[in-house]
Amino acid sequence: MHAGPPLNARGRYYHIDCGPGDLAPYILTTGDPGRARRISRHFDRITLKRHNREFLTYTGVYHNIPVSVMATGIGAAPSAIAMVEAAQCVQPATFIRLGSTGALQEHISLGDLIITTEARRDENTTHYYAPPDVKARVHPQVLAALKQAAQELAAPYHLGVTCTTADFYAGQGRLVPGFPTLEPDKVKRLSRAGVLNLEMEMSAYLTLAAVSTYRIRAGGACAVFANRITGAAAFGAKNLHAIEKRLIRVGLRAVEILAEEDGRK
């Protein structure tokens, strides 16, 4: 019986179509393949591109730093698949999620960044890897790098707890015609508890990094595309890419900060 993840006909890991040497030690992740492409355009050069199913990967160089970006599709389940297979390709590895999110506090504006400190595991994927009492916390070095990057670039940001859900609609308390929602007051409950935002991937990276026997750091930031309390939303707005560009710049600057620190060590 094969002792590791399955391989495809090219000898690469089955889902991400990558193998050892294909990924850089700094890996930016996003659900959206379009965002992965836009991140890769900031690289000084691209040395690899792979696309299989929903997984889109670019590896290249940014300011003399080897870096990869991976699109994983929506949700904790494909994020975990990508992380498990990517960790077989490169060690040590740093994963930084750059996503979009809905804010749960009235004072958070569209376009602000939410830098997660800890994620509530309101999805079922990570419970196959770790018991419920394991906390999904950001690695302190990644957290510090994202915070410094946001400050340097004058990007408005908030630090706090994220809730990662398994579903965009009922899982996030949305009332949608034709489908029941078992917890219509979920947004209010989380907001009262001080949770900053809802999204669908962060806890996968943080939990798997926490329990892995490999040397893995993980963290992330999300750009606010909607405020679930005020009802404000940027979906389809002309400034959506400007909001995303701010997020990308902060993520890439965080990679630079981490690489500088790692180089000194």
Image: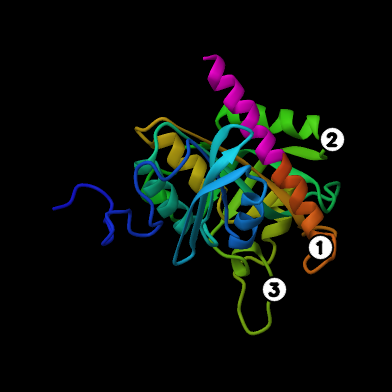
Q: Amino acid at mark 2?
A: Ala
Which residue bears the numbered disc 1? 234
Name the spot of residue 89 as percent of width and height, x first: 37, 42
Per the image, label 2 sits on a secondary structure element best described as loop
Per the image, label 1 sits on a secondary structure element best described as loop
Q: Amino acid at mark 1?
A: Ala
- Residue 2 shows in the view: yes
Q: Nearer the viewer, mark 1 or mark 2?
A: 2
Which residue bears the numbered disc 3? 175
Q: Amino acid at mark 3?
A: Leu
- Which stretch is magenta? 250-265
- 69 versus 219 height, above or below: below
Name the spot of residue 77 as percent of width and height, x first: 45, 58
Name the spot of residue 120 as percent of width and height, x first: 57, 46
Distance (Cα) linking label 2 and label 3: 36 Å
Check residue 260 for magenta coloring: yes
Looking at the image, the residue that sits furthest to the left is 1
Q: Name which quarter of the figure residue 257 lies in.
A: top right
Q: Disc 2 or 3, which lies upstream in sequence?
A: 2
- Residue 196 shows in the view: no
Q: Image check: 186 left or right of 60?
A: right
Q: Disc 3 or 1, which lies upstream in sequence?
A: 3
Distance (Cα) linking label 1 and label 2: 21 Å
Which residue bears the numbered disc 2? 154
Colouring method of the image: rainbow
- 265 versus 82 height, above or below: above
Q: Nearer the viewer, mark 3 or mark 1?
A: 1
- Residue at 83 percent of width and 53 percent of height: 110
Contact (Cβ within 8 Å) of mark 1 with mark 2: no
Distance (Cα) linking label 3 and label 1: 19 Å
Crowding around mark 2 (Cα neighbors within 10 Å: few <14, some 14 to 19, many 20+) is few
